[in-house]
Image (tube, rainbow, N blue to C red):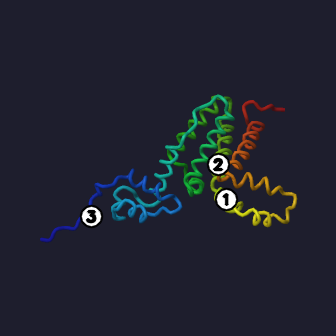
Amino acid sequence: MGGESKRPGPDPKISRDDIIEAALSIGFEKLTLTAIARRLGVSQNSLYHYVDDRADVVAAAMDHVVERMAWPPQSDDWRRQLGSIGTAFFDTMIDYPGLARLVEQADHPPEFMQRRFGETHAHLMSLGFGSAEALLAMDVVYDLAIDSAARSARLERHFADPAKTAASWEHAPTVDIETALALGASDRGASWFRHKLQIALSGIAAEIGPDRTTH
């Protein structure tokens, strides 16, 4: 009587954490299960004992990144609080190319991000925001950080050649190309983002901030 063939058991050389770390080393833009298996020196089939598929790896890696993000401490100044969170979030998205688009396209935010989102929401309400206003303020800042990070690589390419950039704006002669180049090309778009963030925070203060003047 022949013995039954059995599916190989979990590979003792790897773990789910090893797979996540390998995924982060490879990068979101080039992430495949084949690349992870090659990096870990195991067969691709052995990965399925720890993860369901590529989407499972991506979701876990996203949550891992957000969990390790240097979240700023709570501040009694709501503007500083939101500004610091927006900047930290933008910087994290920049450090992991492709992450911003994944967060943008995800059906729901990573688990740890949801927890931080809830903590920030509660803190803003303690500073005088209404629930809906706090949520809207956070949404403005998070969306700005994600969108700016996703566009950063495109802006870098766009501003890489000053002559080409100037030519692309030839039909708008009043545009100050030098200023645009200085803001858009420096530190991977960080200066450009910070200018936009300050404008957004001023808008929040005027429209829904706890200290706004109503007429």
Residue 6: quarter of image: bottom left
Residue 147 seen by the camera? no
* Location of mark 2 (residue): 145
- Residue that sits furthest to the bottom in the current view: 2
Q: Point out the tag, 2 or 1, that comes first from the N-terminus.
A: 2
**What label sits on residue 156 in the rendered view?**
1
| 122 displayed left or right of 202 | left
Q: Quadrant of the C terminus?
A: top right
Q: Amino acid at mark 2?
A: Ala
Residue 34 seen by the camera? yes
Image spot of residue 134 (x, y percent): 66, 37
Q: Point out the tag, 2 or 3, that comes first from the N-terminus.
A: 3
48 shown above or below 125: below
| 207 displayed left or right of 65 | right
* Location of mark 3 (residue): 7
- The one of 87 and 135 positioned closer to us in this rendering: 87
Q: CA distance from mark 2 to mark 3?
A: 45 Å
Name the residue at 63% across, 53% down: 149
Q: Amino acid at mark 3?
A: Arg
- Residue that sits furthest to the right in the current view: 174
13 shown above or below 123: below
| 119 displayed left or right of 173 | left
Q: CA distance from mark 1 to mark 3?
A: 48 Å
Task: For the residues labelled 2 and 1, say whether their Cβ atoms are less than 8 Å apart.
Answer: no
Image spot of residue 36 (x, y percent): 41, 61
